[in-house]
Amino acid sequence: MRYICVVGETALFNPFQVSGYAGSKYFCNRSSELQRLKEISENNRNVVVYSLRRMGKTSMLRHWMGKLKRKKVLVTYIDIMATNSQKNLIDMLAQNIIETFDNSGQKWIKSIGQTFKKIRPKISIDALTGNPSISIDVKNETDFKHSIDELFSYIKKKSAKNKLVIIIDEFQQIATYESGNTEALLRGKIQEVPNVSFVFSGSVKHMLLNMFVSQNRPFYQSADLMHLVEIDNAEYSKFIGKHFTNAQCKISDNAIELILSITRRHTYYVQLMCNRLYAKHYKVIGEKQVNTTLQAILNENQHLYYNYRNLLTKVQWKLLTAIAKEKEVEQPTSKDFLQTYDLGANSTVQRALNSLLSKEMIFKNETKYMVTDVFLSTWMEALPI
């Protein structure tokens, strides 16, 4: 089977987006995950959604938000990656949650004033957009507790008759705040809003999971766990073939299979490869065009890859290269692996392994270690031992 088409003269919208959510037309599958999110929220449970970076987690959540809104379910999405304190957090939560219920300017301002009484908020207007923003004068943990109490009283009142879903992306960020009681305060208040489902998502797996599976943490066993993995091979093949066909280009089954093999079906890398191929307006795409595109990407990023070597120790770089060459490694401290790649002592390699994991240069998938950056891994395969 082959997908057939002809390129028109006008530039077509590239359906393979590498950032952001472009709409349901350009979203691939995730039907089982979406069904599970639906069941969890309808039964007033919370869920932790975690994955590798750029696996399509945020796009899936955005897609689900559209489904919720069509069913008249109130939903708000809050990305707290940029926050570094309790003050940043309460400002962002208040801004987004109150806008969900009271989205007109004057009504929003009035609600802010009525909600926060112990800690008076400051409201400013953006000179360019005309939109109001909030800044709550949180100076210490007591101020934060008062602000959280008042915000959750507002949520409880407003959600009594309106089901609400609150999505907090990069939730592990709260564990980095200097104030150590953020988790406990939030956990206590979340228990008080029965008609609200929370989605805690993030890409730093060890930090996020520790918050929910460690017995000594406030959020222990307070949410279902959902690990977002690669999209099914058949579904992704169909998706790729359909969009090239719609653009009137011919792409072979072998070319699609090669794309998915090279990229490990990691969403970002699949999208980038297809985006680059699509942009070339090829009339025919086979394995040659796929390999040419891959080589171009590797050449463009070569200076970045060499820079990684300057940022790592010699042992870390050698270990990273060795894992890339093997593609996946189950026992990176085994005698055979150490000898094959001349890595030195077991204890030295174990320290390097832990460092690479903490830097997210590698990850452990089930029982095997792999280089996180798919294209970096491919580039390193050609390096000398």
Image (cartoon, rainbow, N blue to C red):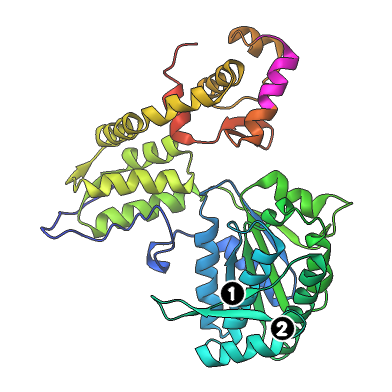
What percent of the width, then of the height, locates residue 235?
Answer: 45, 53
Please state which of the two labelled residues, at mark 1 or mark 2, is closer to the viewer.
2
What percent of the width, then of the height, locates residue 125?
Answer: 48, 80
Q: Which residue is mark 2?
A: 116
**Are dots 1 and 2 in contact, CB under 8 Å?**
no
Query: Residue 76, labelled with which disc?
Result: 1
Residue lying farthest to the right in this orientation: 216
Q: Is residue 345 above or below residue 141?
A: above
Give the residue type that dot 1 points to: Thr
Secondary structure category for the residue under label 1: strand
Residue 5 location, quadrant: bottom left
- Could you say which is closer to the camera, residue 379 or residue 29? 379
Residue drawn at the location 27% of the way across and 44% of the way down: 277
Please give the range of residues in magenta: 344-353
- Could you say which is closer to the camera, residue 104 or residue 362? 104
Residue drawn at the location 58% of the way across and 27% of the way down: 328
Residue drawn at the location 37% of the way across and 28% of the way down: 302
